[in-house]
């Protein structure tokens, strides 16, 4: 089965002590313990892998590149074996992130070169860019479900957002513009950003045909962008007045599909707090710049965000509603309106 693993090239990292990712200690990553790793970019790139199971792990020769691809500046042919060489736990002193050394078997021994890092954490679970993270421990022989690796989240270009002056395309909304929020009325946009991604695998956009979930026009969201469900479904399944459900859980309903191929431009907008906006008439979340929402941001973009919100962590500690978990979200998304 094919799947994508989002990888940050070694060239986009700064490692203290003159170290590299290469597995010089029998491929267990222990040479990095005590060092710091700083992500200099949010240029996570998807690597598409063919596999006979749903785990990305060490010492599994069934994991191969699905077609020719470029990793860390080098082009590799399809069929090249890839593996999770070792795992590391990184810490900023408060939070911890689990990462794996992404290795293409192009050397002898195979662990002699490790080309990048992949991140565990699900939607948006990337470590922050530009922050030195200490390697607190390492382990050999990692095995993680492909679905547990981090992916980005946001609005697709062209999505109209409700404002007091009528709907506007998200790409046309600037800092300072007023947007209508469901939970707090008119609010000024404090920050915005955008990025183009390859529309494939776990980052391919979810497309809602007009009317699929009450949307007035076609709605395009990243797979993990959350839609707010209210009414009897939220009460019945979650005992909540409202619940936030990732867009990907709606795939399979009439008029909802994943669109693969080419690229997709994703946009973020943020307010003074996490808010619910109307996108094509549907209640959806604004950007939440927390441990999850900071995914995929370039270093200069993250610096701008921190300048706008100096108390970033404390300000955005709470979501604008309860969040559906696992199968719960799928049941809610598939239930009738």
Image: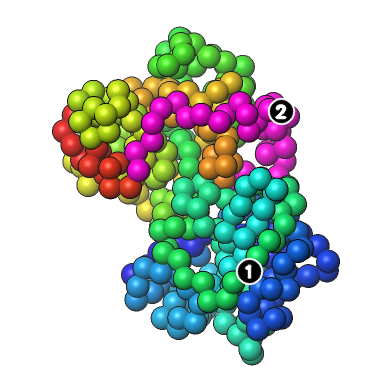
* Residue 75 visible in the displayed image: no
- Name the residue located 72 percent from the left edge and 67 percent from the top edge: 33
Q: Secondary structure at mark 2?
A: loop
- Name the residue located 68 percent from the left edge and 61 percent from the top edge: 136
Residue that label 2 marks:
310
Q: Is residue 238 magenta?
A: no
Nearest to the observer: residue 267 or residue 305: 305
- Name the residue located 49 percent from the left edge and 16 percent from the top edge: 179
* Residue 94 visible in the displayed image: yes
Classify residue 328 as left or right of residue 8.
Answer: left
Residue that label 1 marks:
138
Location of residue 94 in the rendering, given as x and y in whole percent from the top left corner:
66, 45
Q: Is residue 311 magenta?
A: yes
Nearest to the observer: residue 249 or residue 45: 249
As measured in the structure, the alpha-carbon distance from the residue carrying label 2 to the one carrying label 1 is: 32 Å
Location of residue 238 in the rendering, given as x and y in whole percent from the top left corner:
27, 33
- The stretch of residues the image draws in magenta is 296-325
Q: Residue furthest bottom?
A: 108
């Amino acid at each position: 089965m094919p799947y994508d693993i989002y990888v940050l090239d070694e060239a986009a990292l700064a490692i203290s002590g003159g170290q590299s990712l290469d597995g010089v200690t029998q491929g267990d990553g222990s040479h990095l313990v005590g060092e710091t790793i700083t992500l200099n970019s949010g240029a996570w790139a998807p690597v598409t892998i063919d596999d006979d199971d749903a785990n990305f792990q060490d010492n599994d020769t069934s994991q191969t590149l699905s077609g020719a691809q470029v990793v860390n500046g080098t082009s590799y042919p399809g069929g090249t074996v890839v593996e999770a060489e070792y795992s590391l736990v990184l810490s900023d002193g408060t939070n911890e992130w689990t990462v794996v050394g992404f290795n293409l078997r192009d050397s002898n021994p195979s662990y002699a070169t490790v080309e990048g890092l992949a991140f565990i954490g699900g939607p948006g679970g990337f470590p922050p860019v530009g922050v030195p993270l200490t390697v607190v421990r390492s382990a050999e022989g990692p095995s993680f479900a492909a679905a547990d690796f981090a992916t980005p989240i946001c609005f697709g270009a062209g999505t109209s957002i409700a404002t007091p002056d009528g709907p506007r395309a998200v790409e046309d909304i600037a800092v300072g513009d007023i947007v209508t929020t469901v939970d707090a009325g008119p609010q000024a946009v404090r920050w915005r950003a955008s990025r183009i991604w390859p529309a494939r695998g776990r980052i391919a956009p979810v497309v809602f045909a007009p009317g699929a979930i009450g949307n007035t026009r076609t709605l395009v969201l990243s797979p993990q962008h959350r839609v707010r469900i209210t009414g009897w479904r939220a009460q019945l399944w979650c005992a909540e007045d409202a619940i936030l459900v990732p867009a990907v859980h709606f795939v399979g309903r009439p008029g909802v599909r994943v669109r693969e191929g080419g690229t997709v431009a994703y946009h973020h907008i943020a307010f003074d707090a996490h808010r619910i906006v109307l996108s094509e008439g549907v209640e959806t979340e604004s950007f939440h710049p927390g441990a999850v929402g900071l995914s995929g941001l370039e270093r200069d973009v993250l610096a701008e965000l921190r300048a706008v919100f100096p108390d970033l962590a404390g300000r955005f500690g709470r979501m604008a509603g309860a969040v559906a978990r696992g199968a719960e979200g799928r049941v809610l998304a598939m239930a009738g309106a």
